[in-house]
Image (cartoon, helix red, strand yellow):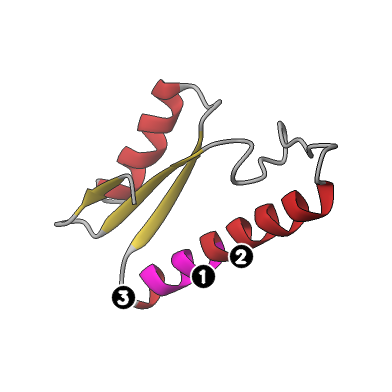
Amino acid sequence: MDIAFTRSRVAVFVDGCFWHVCPVHATSPAANSQWWAEKLTKNRERDEATNAHLNELGWDVVRIWEHEDPVEAADRIAAVVRPSSG
């Protein structure tokens, strides 16, 4: 977890496009490709397991891609940390 809002129980992760297999910017190295494919698949599986575990503990999870606009990312986080009373 990169940032934790403990009172709101919101966990924020800032994921690198390569390491977390961004759907927009993911790349696959040519050298040792099988090893990398397995490594990156395990990273994604660990991310999903982490999300599920935190959700089971009552936490909301926000994942931000490294390429996201910081203001838009902050707005997404704020919407979860301080939901509007509707």
Measuring from the top left, give residue 36's x and y in whole percent.
Answer: 73, 49
The residue that mark 2 highlights is 45
Choose the circle earlier in sequence order: 3 or 2: 2
Query: Residue sitting at 17 percent across and 56 percent down?
Result: 6
Q: CA gap, disc 3 to disc 2?
A: 18 Å
Looking at the rendered structure, which numbered label has been put on residue 30? none
67 vs 34, left or right, is left
Q: Residue furthest bottom?
A: 56
Asked whether disc 3 touches disc 2, contact meaning CB atoms under 8 Å apart, the reply is no
76 vs 85, left or right, is right
Report which quarter residue 50 is drawn in: bottom left
Measuring from the top left, give residue 38's x and y in whole percent.
Answer: 73, 59
Report which quarter residue 24 is drawn in: top right
Q: Amino acid at mark 1?
A: Ala
* Closer to the eye: label 1 or 3: 1
Looking at the rendered structure, which numbered label has been put on residue 49? 1
Q: Secondary structure at mark 2?
A: helix
Q: Is residue 43 visible?
A: yes
Looking at the rendered structure, which numbered label has been put on residue 57? 3
13, 18: nearer the viewer: 18
Q: Amino acid at mark 3?
A: Leu
Which region shows up in magenta?
Answer: 48-54
